Amino acid sequence: MSNRILVLYGSYRSDRMGVRLANFVIDRLRGRGENVEFIDAKTIGLPMLDRMYKEYPKGSAPEALEKLAGQIRGADGFVFVTGEYNWGIQPGLKNLTDHFLEEWFWRPAAIVSYSAGRLSGARASTAWHGTLSEMGMVVVSSTIGVGPIAQTLSADGEPIGEGGKTLERSFPRFADDLLWWIEAAKAQRARKAPPY
């Protein structure tokens, strides 16, 4: 039985390089038989956070927010694909994530980072780890960092060069860890109601 996984991406730039990595992750997870859905913060276009989803009276949240809440609640796990902006996390992805709280609870999240440089978004990945943990997700220990992204993935998300070979070798372990935690969390949620 396949797992429902959301791949979340947050760049608002016109020349978005990170979408290559999102496409790679989606393709490889689908190749393992998983049910994967792409959540693009730019396409959804939520406003800067004024009210969280839970702060709207029931049935009155904007349509995009209501739909996304259902997608998050229905997911078994998440992959956050994040670039690094000035040693920090992308504001578009953070804004989308902050619109929700309880919807994320008791499910695993994995972080995949990228940058134009050699550090592969490592600082953004580290920042996301604490943020996602605080929001009630179990953040898996395996991460992937890609950089320079233009020398690692082609425009259609296929691995190229030595960086691409390294990415292909590292992805199975990353996916195995995420899927182990997804199965563990599903079993626990089925066995026992969440504590609050």
Image (spheres, rainbow, N blue to C red):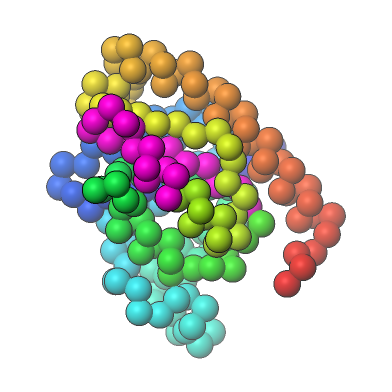
Residue extending furthest left? Answer: 14
Nearest to the observer: residue 94 or residue 29: 94
Q: Which residues are magenta?
A: 107-127
Instruction: Work out whether 52 lies above or below 181.
Output: below
Residue 140 percent location from the top left of the image: 59, 41
Choose top left, top right, bottom left or bottom right for residue 24: top left
The residue located at (71%, 41%) in the rendering is: 183
55 part of magenta stretch: no
The residue located at (40%, 80%) in the rendering is: 51
Choose top left, top right, bottom left or bottom right for residue 115: top left
Instruction: Work out whether 170 lies above or below 3.
Output: above
- Please say whether residue 28 is visible from this viewpoint: yes
Residue 73 percent location from the top left of the image: 58, 61
Instruction: Work out whether 8 lies above or below 160.
Output: below
The residue located at (29%, 22%) in the rendering is: 152
Q: Quadrant of the N terminus?
A: top right
Residue 33 percent location from the top left of the image: 58, 31
